[in-house]
Amino acid sequence: MRGERGQAIVEFALVLPLLLVLLLGVALVAEIGVARLALEHAAAEAARTGSLTNDDDLVRSTVAAAVGPLDASLVSVIIEPTQNQDPRSSAPRGSLLRVRLRYARSLPLGFVGLPRLTVEGTAARRVEWTP
């Protein structure tokens, strides 16, 4: 009876690191999924704001408000074309506005040489605003 208890502890000690690595992987994949959903949602809201107002500052503030659980200061916003470029500077109605968001996330084991992970979200809308 005493030897069986020792065997169970040894087996548990051998399996525990594998279970911890598996749990860390599941948590990382879930965090990446949440980040991607937040970026897609924020990009859609920002593209909608840009299509209705034609104002890049409002697009950026919409991203900061809608990015959800992510740190808004780490999200880079790319608006194509910008407010000062054609066709948005002259007759923007009907032109395509693209909003791309990028969020660089360092991995938990980054110190061992794993790269940073970049999660992206994009959206596009036709501009409805007329000057």
Image: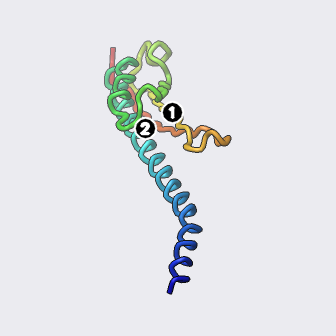
Q: Position of residue 31 (x, y in %)?
A: 45, 47
| Quarter where residue 89 is shown | top left
Q: Position of residue 104 (x, y in %)?
A: 53, 34
Report the residue marked by disc 1: 102
Q: Residues within 10 Å of mark 2 (few under 14, many from 20)?
A: many
Q: Position of residue 60 (x, y in %)?
A: 39, 23
Q: Residue at x 49, y 22 (%)?
A: 81
Report the residue marked by disc 2: 39
Q: Residue at x 37, y 27 (%)?
A: 64
Q: Given the current orientation, which residue lies at the most extreme bottom position?
A: 1
Q: Position of residue 28 (x, y in %)?
A: 50, 49
The answer to whether residue 36 is above or below residue 27 is above
The front one of 131 and 5 is: 5
Q: Residue at x 56, y 78 (%)?
A: 7
Q: Residue at x 36, y 38 (%)?
A: 69
Is label 1 in contact with label 2 (beta carbons under 8 Å)? Answer: yes
| Quarter where residue 44 is shown | top left
Q: Residues within 10 Å of mark 1 (few under 14, many from 20)?
A: some
| Quarter where residue 38 is shown | top left
The answer to whether residue 74 is above or below residue 30 is above
Q: Is 50 positioned to the left or the right of 25 in the image? A: left
The label shown at residue 1 is: none
The answer to whether residue 126 is above or below residue 113 is above
**Disc 2 secondary structure class:** helix
Pick whichever of labels 1 and 2 is earlier in the sequence. 2
Quadrant containing the C terminus is top left
**Disc 1 secondary structure class:** strand
Q: How many marks?
A: 2
| Distance between mark 1 and mark 2 Cα atoms | 8 Å
The front one of 58 and 106 is: 106
